[in-house]
Image: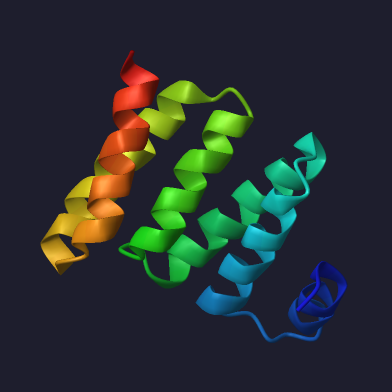
Amino acid sequence: MNIETLQTMLDQGQDSLILRFGLAQALLKRNDPDDTNKAITHLLKALEFDAEYSAALKLLGKAYVQTGQNQLAIETYEKGIKTAEAKGDIQAAKEMKVFLKRLLK
């Protein structure tokens, strides 16, 4: 779905974790600073639905990096790694470890 469709669904009150996550993913693909900031807002809202959704934590870390908020990215990846490992989401944990390692260089 495109951003406009997702935004219309949200405007009509169909707020959910998956909708917010999908909207954030679509916004980040545009590589526009304003859209990245909107994506961060949607990801934070998605995490209100489920604070342990590792895919949202991974994407939020990426969005923070894109906006130059490296300390927030580090904290988000650290939380995401712990969360993913606790849930058995090994692939997400591995990916976030790589992203974190790059940030810490």
**56 or 13: nearer the viewer:** 56
Rendered-image quadrant of the N terminus = bottom right
Q: Is residue 62 above or below residue 69?
A: below
Establish if 37 lies above or below 44.
Answer: above
Q: Is residue 36 left or right of residue 74?
A: right
Foreground pick, 91 / 40 = 91
Q: Residue at x 36, y 24 (%)?
A: 102
Q: Residue at x 26, y 38 (%)?
A: 97
Image quadrant in which the C terminus is located: top left
Q: Is residue 41 above or below residue 98?
A: below
Asked if residue 51 lies left or right of residue 85, the reply is right
Q: Residue furthest top?
A: 105
Q: How many marks?
A: 0
Residue 35, percent across and down?
Answer: 77, 46
Q: Please give the name of the residue rendered at 38% of the width and 70% of the height, measured from the top-left corner.
A: 50
Residue 11, given in percent of the width and then of the height, sits at 81, 78
Q: Is residue 83 left or right of residue 98?
A: left
Q: Identify the residue at horizontal 54%, vertical 35% (top origin).
A: 64
Residue 73 location in percent, x, y?
Answer: 43, 33
Judging depth in this view, the residue of 8 and 92 nearest the camera is 92
